[in-house]
Image (cartoon, rainbow, N blue to C red):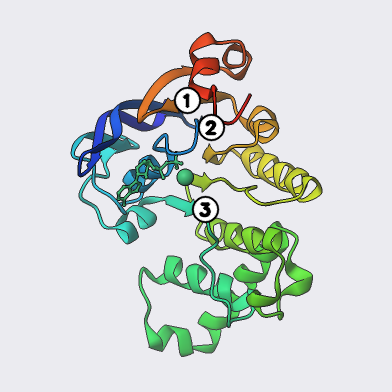
């Protein structure tokens, strides 16, 4: 069954057609990669899934319900979480506090100072947040300030902040961007572990090693249009894909 179904999505920025009749189906429980040259429209598409942008036309269904017109927090509460291209964390807070915020928001729907101040409420949120840090291997750094983390650890922290919300669909925009090989491999292992639990993921990624290690399905976006959607083994040799990448990144 499709958990995310995208049909005929178009998005213009003035004279630029950033998304051109995009169709995409993400099967529940799979890792679906979106690849394509720089400027192909990948981040724009993800922004249309999380309510940061509204498509000009087209439909985006999550579990058969339309996401169009919903606010980002409503989409998040429906079960869609996103790891951004640049980590969005609270630099001046500890790792534990960073993860407590989304854990708290999830369990209460919204911030409520009373619940935040209750001892029982805080203890369970605290435990949940620590569990989230453990999940990504950051529990030993729980009291450190987020600003002190390496780039790779910041991304792991952001992942913990998503996972603690127990999403049904996780969207990742270039999760290994700027990472050295060892960190990239750790991230691949971590994402494999998470996908092994059945969490559906959509991953935008430049690094083909990451894409081919994780994805069961790949959509190739070029100039705002999905030119191929297929299994990884059929992507590499596809002449349309080779052509899209000419002059840009290489497969
Ligand atoms: P990708 O993530 O594949 O590199 P983007 O989705 O970021 O590509 O961008 C697709 C195209 O849309 C690019 O030409 C980019 O310059 C343009 N674009 C993206 N966001 C905006 C915006 N907010 N306003 C105007 N143009 C934008
Ligand atoms: Mg992008």
Q: Is mark 3 within 8 Å of ligand 2?
A: yes
Left or right: 244, with 47 as reference point: right
Q: Position of residue 116 (x, y in %)?
A: 46, 84
Give the residue pinned by disc 2.
Answer: 33
Q: Work out which quarter of the rendered image holds the C terminus and state it.
A: top right
- Mark toward the viewer: 3 or 2: 3
Q: Is residue 50 above or below residue 117?
A: above
| Residue in the image at 47% along x and 25% along y | 219
26 or 44: nearer the viewer: 44
| Disc 3/disc 2 C-alpha distance (Å) | 15 Å
Give the residue pinned by disc 3.
Answer: 85
What kind of element bears circle 1? strand
Q: Is residue 135 above or below residue 66?
A: below
Q: Which mark is residue 219?
A: 1
| Disc 2/disc 1 C-alpha distance (Å) | 6 Å
Q: Is mark 2 within 8 Å of ligand 1?
A: no
Q: Are marks 2 and 1 in contact (CB under 8 Å)?
A: yes
| Residue in the image at 61% along x and 60% along y | 160
70 or 37: nearer the viewer: 37
Q: Position of residue 232 (x, y in %)?
A: 60, 19
What kind of element bears circle 2? strand
Q: Is residue 155 above or below residue 141?
A: above
| Disc 3/disc 1 C-alpha distance (Å) | 19 Å
Q: Position of residue 130 (x, y in %)?
A: 67, 70
Q: Residues within 10 Å of mark 2 (few under 14, many from 20)?
A: many
| Residue in the image at 51% along x and 46% along y | 173
Q: Name the N-terminal-most of marks 2 and 1.
A: 2
């Amino acid at each position: 069954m499709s958990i995310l179904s995208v049909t005929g999505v178009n998005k213009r920025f003035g004279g630029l057609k950033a998304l051109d009749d995009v169709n995409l189906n993400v099967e529940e429980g799979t890792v679906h990669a979106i690849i394509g040259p720089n400027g192909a429209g990948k981040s724009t598409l993800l922004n249309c899934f999380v309510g940061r942008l509204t498509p000009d036309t087209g439909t985006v269904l999550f579990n058969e319900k339309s996401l169009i017109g919903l606010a980002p927090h409503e989409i998040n509460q429906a079960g869609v979480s996103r790891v951004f291209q640049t980590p969005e964390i609270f630099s001046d807070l500890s790792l534990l506090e960073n993860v407590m915020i989304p854990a708290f928001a999830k369990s209460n729907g919204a911030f409520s100072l009373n619940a935040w101040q209750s001892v029982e409420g805080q203890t369970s949120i605290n435990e949940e947040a620590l569990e989230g840090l453990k999940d990504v291997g950051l529990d030993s750094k729980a009291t450190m300030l987020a600003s002190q983390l390496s780039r790779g650890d910041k991304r792991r922290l952001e992942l913990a902040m998503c996972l603690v919300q127990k999403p049904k669909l996780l969207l990742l925009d270039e999760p290994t961007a700027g990472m050295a090989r060892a960190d990239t491999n750790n991230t691949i292992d971590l994402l494999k572990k998470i996908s092994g639990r059945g969490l559906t993921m959509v991953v935008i990624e430049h690094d083909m090693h990451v894409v081919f290690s994780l994805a069961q399905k790949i959509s190739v976006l070029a100039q705002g249009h999905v030119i191929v959607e297929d299994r990884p083994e059929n992507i590499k040799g596809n002449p349309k894909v080779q052509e899209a990448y000419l002059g840009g990144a290489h497969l």
